[in-house]
Image (cartoon, grey):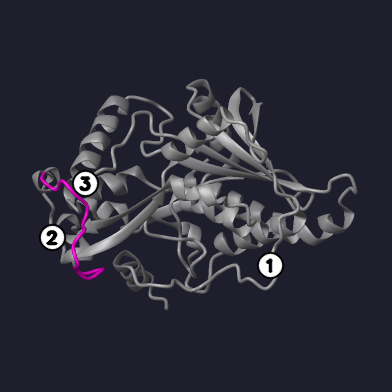
Amino acid sequence: MNFSIKKSILIFSLVVFCCEFKANAQTSATNDSTSELTIYTMPTLHPLDWSSPASLYKSMKNCYLKTITQSDNYLLGHVAIMLKSPLLPKPLLVAQASASARERVDLVLNQKVGFGIMGITLKGRLETEAELNHKLNVYTKREKLAFIKYKISHKAAQRIIEFLQHYSTKTNNNFAPCDFYGGAFWPRYHNEGAGCSAFGITLLELANVLPPEANEWKIDVNIPMSIIGGEINQYKKIRNRTIKKTNSWYTGNGKANIDYIRYFVYEPSIMFDWILNKRKSVDSIYKPITENGAPGLIVDASNQKIDDTEAIFVERPEPNLFIDYFYKRIDVK
């Protein structure tokens, strides 16, 4: 089955889920008082060092060289989501991914965009249930899979379903947000795609179950413009030796989107370690569980309040050069 057919089937399934939502809500069994939202995290197979651009480049290169022959490998780690609810005809397992590894290779090796690769827009897609089930099994066997399962209200599940319907539906400009992948995106902002972890964290946010501790999962840095190339920076080509000499993130008093670009990401490897460490502590909220051989935590958030007046999609609060070029490309806003 080719990619376009797989994608059409996945998007059709999401639409069917949402169309059946109201009917299923009316006929759901009274014993089913909650839905379940599970976030799965798969770390890099070798650790990344985010202390500086130079150390990140070196550790990423090392990770790539050590896993180049490894099949079923998410080089930068990965995050997936499963939603189980009486509001759906069956459980939904989904994740955001880039559509082509070749595009990334071309940008890095041929166009030499340097750290521009962290936020430049790539073609995106939603992964299918079949391929994700396979990857979850593979990572479980590697002991590189962990998860958090949240019991949530049907109202929270409804918000997630509504988000997914809009996120996977094409607009009049003939694109859906899920068609775009990039590290600068935040999928709750109008028309934006996502990276894999941003996609997963957004669903936790929509269900109002994102814990304060999630700040520990985040990497937040300012990328110096001197190591960003491609269309973002006058099509400059960044040499590897320039990155190797960049021993700190930008810390000066310069202007955002001129001297540096702010970049943040929820790091799957940090999330993975956090879950394993949390399992070792006594906690009244997070309870350790194991499912299908994978370690995880379970949280009862079924009574968490949902604000019906809060918009699902909102405006981006501050400009970002990566996103500005994305909007120019798709000619919206």
Query: Circle 1 sits on which residue?
Result: 307
Residue at the spot 86% in from the left edge and 51% down from the top edge:
28
Q: CA distance from mark 3 to mark 2?
A: 18 Å
- Nearest to the eye among marks 3 and 2: give it: 3
Depth check: 225 or 217 in front? 217
Query: Circle 3 sits on which residue?
Result: 53
Q: Residues within 10 Å of mark 2 (few under 14, many from 20)?
A: some
For residue 253, above or below residue 71:
below
Element at badge 2? loop
Residue at the spot 46% in from the left edge and 33% down from the top edge:
273
Looking at the rendering, which quadrant does residue 58 occupy? Answer: top left
Residue at the spot 50% in from the left edge and 27% down from the top edge:
139
Looking at the rendering, which quadrant does residue 202 occupy? Answer: bottom right
Element at badge 1? loop
Q: Residues within 10 Å of mark 3 (few under 14, many from 20)?
A: many
Q: CA distance from mark 2 to mark 1?
A: 46 Å
Whether residue 265 is in magenta: the answer is no
Magenta span: chief secondary structure: loop
Query: Which amino acid does the dot numbered 2 rest on?
Result: Lys
Query: Which amino acid does the dot numbered 3 rest on?
Result: Pro
Segment colored magenta: 245-258
- Nearest to the eye among marks 2 and 1: give it: 1
For residue 135, above or below residue 36:
above
- Percent across and percent down for residue 157 are 70, 55
134 horizontally vs 317: left or right = right
For residue 273, above or below residue 160:
above
Query: Which amino acid does the dot numbered 1 rest on?
Result: Asp
Residue 236's label in the rendered image is 2
Residue 135 showing in the rendered view:
no
Of the residues under marks 3 and 2, which one precedes in the sequence? Answer: 3
Of the residues under marks 2 and 1, which one precedes in the sequence? Answer: 2
- Percent across and percent down for residue 150 are 67, 44
